[in-house]
Each structure stands twice: as C-alpha cells, then as structure tokens.
Image (cartoon, rainbow, N blue to C red):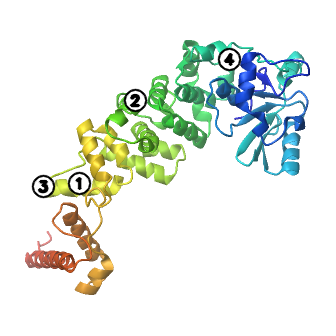
Amino acid sequence: MPPRTDQEPIVATSPAPGQAFSSQAALLWQRLAPHRWPLPLNAWPAGTALVGGAVRDGLLDRLAEKPDLDLVVPGDGIALAKGWAKRHGGTCVVLDPERQIARWVIKGWTIDVARPQGGGQGDGQGAGAHLEAALVDPTGGLSHLEQRQLVAVQEANLRDDPLRLLRGLRLAAELNFELEGESRTWIARHAPLLATVAGERVLAELEKLAAAPQGHRGLQDCLTLGLLEPWGADPKASQALGHLDPASATARGLQPEEQAWALPLARLACLLDSQGLVALRSSRRLQQRCRSLRRWQGSPVQGESAASATTEHQLLELHRSVEADLPALVLHLSVAEAQAALQRWRDPRDPLFHPRAPIDGQTLQQQLGLAPGRQLGALLHHLTLEHAFGRLPSGPAPDALAAVLAAANQWLAEQAAGNAKEAEKPAIPSP
C-alpha cells in the first residue's frame, strides 16, 4: 500500500553530516541494509523519508529479503517514479494521480513514493526535512510494538480507507499482536464500510489473513466484528475455526509444507460458501475447492470393503472431489482418523485415496468393441469403484488385464439383462 503521507516519518533515509544514529535507529538501519536497495541513497531527493511496513518489520526483525519500501518525497512522486523507471528500468504504476502516489517495480522490489499531504508544518514533518538521522515516534508506536499491541492511530483513517478495517486484523494475526480495545470498537463501528471496497481487494486481504499462523483467530475476530456479513460469512464457523490452528494440524500429522496451504484453504472454506466467494470475485478453482471441502467436512474418509454400496459410491466421490486437498479436509477429523488418512494419501498407489480406473477407455473399446458414450463412462466408473475397494487388480500384467476385462464383461452382461427385463414390463396405459 502507499505510504501514510499524513504522518511523520519513522526514520530518515540517511544520517545528516556530523550526526550519529541512536542505537535503535542504527540497528534498524543495519537491518534495512540500504546498500542492497535498487537505487543508491545519493540518487534520492534530499529530504526523502522512509515510512510504513519496512520500518515496522525492521524494528521487529522480520524483514523480507526484498521488503516493500514506502517513501515520502518532496515534490511530485509520480514524476520521480517515472524518471527512475526511465533511467534505471523497471515499471512505473500510477496509484493515485490526485495525491501524486506512484509505484516503481524493479527486479523484485516494490517502491511506493508519495508527496507529503497537508500543509505548513505537516508538510515539513512529512518530508522529513528536519528528522535526519533520528528514529522518530510521533504516535507512540514503539511502545505499542514492545507491548505487542496493534493500535489504530485515528478513527478517520479507517473511514477514509475501509480496507484498513480488515488489514488491521490481518496485521495482528501476522505479528501475533493483540488488537487494542478502542481500535476494536472503531472497526466494529465502521464494519459496514468494508462492503464499499472492491471484492478482489477484500479477498486478497482475507487470503493473507487466512495464511497467517494465527489466522484462525483473526477470522474469528472478523466474524465477531461483523466485517464479513456482506458476503454471507457463516456466523457458526467461529467454533470450527478455533480448531484450525498449527498445533492441531501438527497433531494430525500435517507436515509444515502441507500446513502452509491446507490451513488457509480450510479456514476460507469454513468461513465462506461459493456465493460469498463469487461476490468476492474469487477464481472458479477456489470456489470449487471450497465447495467440495464444505460438502465433505466431517465425513469419514475411509471405509471397509464390506461397506454398503451407497457408502462406497460416496467415498469414491469424496476422494475424487478432494484428492488434491485432503490435508485440508482431515483437519476436521479426529487425530487418529487424520493420521491414518494422511498415511494412505501419501501413497500415490492407494486406489481409494487416488482413484483411477484400472484400464483406459481406449483399451476397453478395442478389447470389447465398445463405442464412446455414456455406457463406456458408466463402465469406467464401475471399474474404478471395484479397483478402489480392492476387488480388481491394476497394472500391465496379463492376469490383471484379464481380470479387469472379465469384470467389464460381467457388468455389461448384467446391464443388458437389466435392460431386457425392463423392456419386458407391460406399458402403463395412459389415463
């Protein structure tokens, strides 16, 4: 996001001649590693100040390899970013022509630049003209960081950009911070304003929130504060979300790389149905994945060969629907059930957890003289079911192929007999 240009900078871009950094500012500057930035500091306009998330993450020692940089610059930010792109390469994107905010993207770096907002003294503070070489904390943010507390600076900021209502919860979940009481009250008060934000922007924040380690708590807060009511979020989902945490996932046997995608997916599926995701302009793929997980949530994923035909058909349909996403589904099962299911799922040869027909349609057509059509599709489904529950072998061995073809012939004979019997029934005269 663009820098908050109406606030004083936290740290200036370089120390003034003859001045020394405070110890905290020096440590922050070391972590920011400006020598790695795509533009040397002497190429920046005098008075440029660094603000925003890079400063916060530097203070918390959680900087990414190429952190997004938010700059407040004297003069026209758009012209500056365009000039950088022309001289050094990369792409310039105009974010806000009225406030002269632009983004320069180059070699994996994202740099947002904006001119100071307001007038008089505020402009001087925003530009950082007299704040060289100092770590400046105009709103008490350092104490909030020490207390691991997230605080909204002004209620008006939430009204001016309603996406901040959701972003605050996302940041709290990412940082494992507590949301300050008055800030929580403000978010609840203005929650309906979130519906004025484009759906895809809301979804992007939700996906980041769901991916945070404490994302389940953040999503519970979303429900409590009414942020997701416009998209039909299930108010009963709060209890289920409480179980979708890293500790529960670990207990059920999910590896860290599996948790990284299964927990966010399970949380979103628990929270929103297909209609809500459509309203948020999600991809059809995400809608389908969440729809399948919601349908089968809590269902048993294993069955004995002696199970009823109905149960077998349901289990086969379940595994066809959620084959790739099973780790997200087992988060709703008991520890023992989940561990057993994951052990089978990790075996790519398991015929139920990775259902495949033991023979392809082309071979059936060649061996049995069948034509493409509904009958062939139904036969393949039958053979897949028999294979999934261990009643048919698979593989290229002649005896395996013979067994599959015999089962196919038997099924075709049963279908023909059933059709003949149906044809023999007397027609019911019309009244």
Q: Check disc 1 and give the amino acid type.
A: Gln
Q: CA distance from mark 4 to mark 3?
A: 62 Å
Looking at the rendered image, the disc whose residue lies closer to the viewer, 4 or 2, is 4
User: Which circle's residue, 3 or 2, is located before the other in the chain?
Assistant: 2
Question: Which numbered marker is on residue 308?
Answer: 3
Locate residue 263, reporting x and y percent: 42, 39
Residue that badge 2 annotates: 235
Name the residue nearer the viewer: 132 or 73.
132
User: Which circle's residue, 4 or 1, is located before the other in the chain?
Assistant: 4
Q: Secondary structure at mark 4?
A: loop
Residue that badge 4 annotates: 154
Q: CA distance from mark 3 to mark 2?
A: 35 Å
- Are circles 4 and 1 on residues that touch, CB within 8 Å? no
Q: Which residue corresponds to the image point at 83% horizontal and 20% vertical from the top-left? A: 133
User: Which circle's residue, 3 or 1, is located before the other in the chain?
Assistant: 3
Q: Secondary structure at mark 2?
A: loop
Residue 372 at least partly seen:
no
Q: CA distance from mark 1 to mark 2?
A: 28 Å
Q: Check disc 2 and give the amino acid type.
A: Pro
User: Which circle's residue, 4 or 3, is located before the other in the chain?
Assistant: 4
Locate residue 177, reporting x and y percent: 54, 21
Q: Is residue 350 above or below residue 297?
A: below
Residue 329 at least partly seen:
yes
User: Which circle's residue, 4 or 2, is located before the other in the chain?
Assistant: 4
